Image: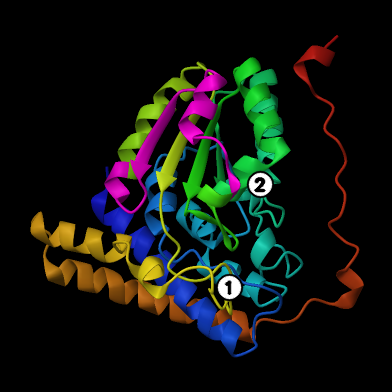
Amino acid sequence: MNRLGLYQTMYRIRRFEERVEALFRQGKIPGFVHLYIGQEAVAAGVLAHRQPGDYVISTHRGHGHALALGVDPREAMAELLGRRTGTCKGKGGSMHLFAYEKGLLGANGIVAGGIPLAVGAGLGLKLLGREEVVLAFFGDGATGRGVFHEGLNLAALWELPILFVLENNHYASTTSFAESHAFQVEALVKAYGIPYLRVDGQEAEAVYHGAGELLQGVRQGKGPAFLEALTHRFKGHYVGDPEQYRSREEAWGAKDPVATYRTHLLESGVEERILWELEQEEERRLDEAVGYAETSPWPDPKEALEDLFVEPVRDYPWEEA
């Protein structure tokens, strides 16, 4: 486990998101923005296990997943600003980041919309005889949707290589989990015969070890597994959310995963100077990302209908002569 790497990932996500909030409030980012602030330990801990060829499915709150995967902050920021140099040439925006070369099969603006995509990707990996896995992130609101149950059922039935990662921040938009769900997640997941583990989503190493434990079985071909990370979003559902459904104490009462882990590193013997230098390097990188995005060209309207379709691949093993 690379502890400095975990901290660097969380720090990058936090400071990236803080810049995004400022740019959005300045009117430089169109649409809606859903910040990942407070949940950094989940993306960092899970995606530290990502191997080449693995696929990742994200959510509308997906900036953290993209950055933890190694998506260039310049390209991610440019995409949020709608510029041609973005990961999707400015066509995806905040809720539809996509970076196939990193294995990111897309963020998704539809709650639970990524789950059937994860099942499809997992089925594809299995049919092609590949050893890679799918890491599928979603929020607690997704567990009340039909495709969540359909997805778990098929993944378990077909023993697909998927790690389902529930980022349970206790609120589906403005409604608490307790007000909208009649079941316990653990009981439901185990009813499908899927291995389940709950971890403290504010502790990076707890997430790392929990994901690693479950991924052993998934990578060995034993079928899907399910990680529930109890976490907190420190900001509203979206930037500008009046947050009348919860108190400020509840919103900010949880431990900060970034600050907590920094303290942990110092107490374990890491020098303050090393952390400071790492942080300064990230600040320079993110300042460069903002400058790159703001000075990048806008897409040409003539490109609006490009990149919509792809020719199907017809080299499936079962079609061999």
Residue at image point 65% right, 59% down: 97
Q: Which residues are magenta?
A: 180-206
Residue at image point 68% right, 25% down: 123
List x then y, in percent, for residue 285. Answer: 42, 74
Say if the magenta span includes residue 135. Answer: no
Residue at image point 41% right, 39% down: 49
Residue 105 is labelled as 2
List x then y, in percent, for residue 38. Answer: 40, 63
Q: Residues within 10 Å of mark 2 (few under 14, many from 20)?
A: many
198 or 79: which is nearer to us?
198
Q: Are marks 1 and 2 in contact (CB under 8 Å)?
A: no
Callout 2: SS: loop
Say if the magenta span includes residue 193. Answer: yes
N-terminal-most mark, 1 or 2: 1
Residue type (three-letter) at the residue carrying disc 2:
Leu
Q: Is residue 239 left or right of residue 230?
A: right
Q: Residues within 10 Å of mark 1 (few under 14, many from 20)?
A: many
Residue 99 is labelled as none
List x then y, in percent, for residue 3. Answer: 25, 51
Is any atom of residue 211 visible in this view? no
Q: Is residue 48 left or right of residue 188?
A: left
Residue type (three-letter) at the residue carrying disc 1:
Met
Residue 77 is labelled as 1
Q: Is residue 55 left or right of residue 284?
A: right
Residue at image point 84% right, 77% down: 300
101 or 119: which is nearer to us?
119
